[in-house]
Image (cartoon, rainbow, N blue to C red):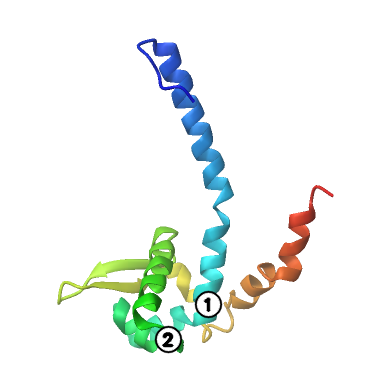
């Protein structure tokens, strides 16, 4: 794609192409939100944060997870997951008294806790994102 020259028409066309590319990229990577939510549920993150009773630091969350892995690498991976969950609105991030970042459940996350049996969405999310349900979508053109 050529960069715009001094011609305003070229600049608007370039902006239009960039907007179209952004739109396509957003659709292409939108699955990340769903699989991140599924991962958080599988790890029990909503339940862990809820049972903590207050904002939870990343290091406290990593300690509470039952994953035996390289601690530094795990913390980096969980940090990325938490950023996605904050971005899509399932968690909120706050500064704690000690100036560390802490994570809290957003109102929608109440439906992701195992103890909310009458409102629980966990089973629905697991079912909809299960490979048995997802694989046919990869063959839609056939």
Q: Secondary structure at mark 1?
A: helix
For mark 2, does the 10 Å Cα neighbourhood hold few (<14), some (14 to 19), or many (20 or more) residues? Answer: some
Label 1 vs 2, first from the N-terminus: 1
Coordinates of residue 122 in the picture (x, y in percent)? 59, 76
Question: Seen in the image, is 15 located left or right of residue 39?
Answer: left
Query: Residue at left 65%, top 68%?
Result: 129
Foreground residue among 79 and 109 = 79
How far is mark 1 from mark 2, CA to CA?
12 Å
Q: Residue furthest top?
A: 7
Seen in the picture, residue 64 relative to 125 is either above or below; the reply is below
Question: Seen in the image, is 7 located left or right of residue 41?
Answer: left
Query: Residue at left 40%, top 78%?
Result: 74
Foreground residue among 142 and 87 = 142
Seen in the picture, residue 105 relative to 138 is either above or below; the reply is below
Query: Residue at left 43%, top 65%?
Result: 85
Q: Residue furthest right?
A: 142
Seen in the picture, residue 56 relative to 22 is either above or below; the reply is below
Residue 122, disc: none
Coordinates of residue 76 in the picture (x, y in percent)? 36, 71
Coordinates of residue 31 in the picture (x, y in percent)? 58, 57
Foreground residue among 35 and 55 = 35
Label 1: which residue? Answer: 41
Coordinates of residue 61 in the picture (x, y in percent)? 36, 82
Q: Residue furthest left?
A: 98
Are the residues tagged 1 and 2 within 8 Å (C-beta)? no
Q: Nearer the viewer, mark 1 or mark 2?
A: 2
Q: Secondary structure at mark 2?
A: loop
Foreground residue among 19 and 46 = 19
Label 2: which residue? Answer: 65
**Quadrant location of residue 139?**
bottom right
């Amino acid at each position: 794609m050529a960069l715009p020259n001094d011609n305003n028409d070229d600049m608007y066309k370039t902006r239009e192409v960039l907007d179209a590319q952004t739109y396509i990229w957003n659709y292409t990577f939108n699955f990340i939100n769903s699989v991140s939510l599924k991962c958080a549920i599988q790890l029990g993150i909503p339940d862990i944060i809820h049972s903590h009773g207050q904002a939870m630091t990343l290091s406290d969350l990593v300690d509470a997870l039952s994953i035996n892995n390289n601690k530094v690498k795990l913390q980096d991976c969980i940090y990325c997951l938490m950023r996605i969950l904050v971005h899509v609105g399932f968690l909120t991030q706050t500064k704690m008294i000690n100036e560390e970042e802490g994570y809290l459940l957003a109102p929608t996350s109440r439906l992701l806790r195992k103890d909310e049996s009458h409102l629980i969405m966990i089973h629905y999310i697991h079912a909809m994102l299960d490979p048995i349900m997802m694989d046919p979508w990869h063959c839609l053109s056939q």
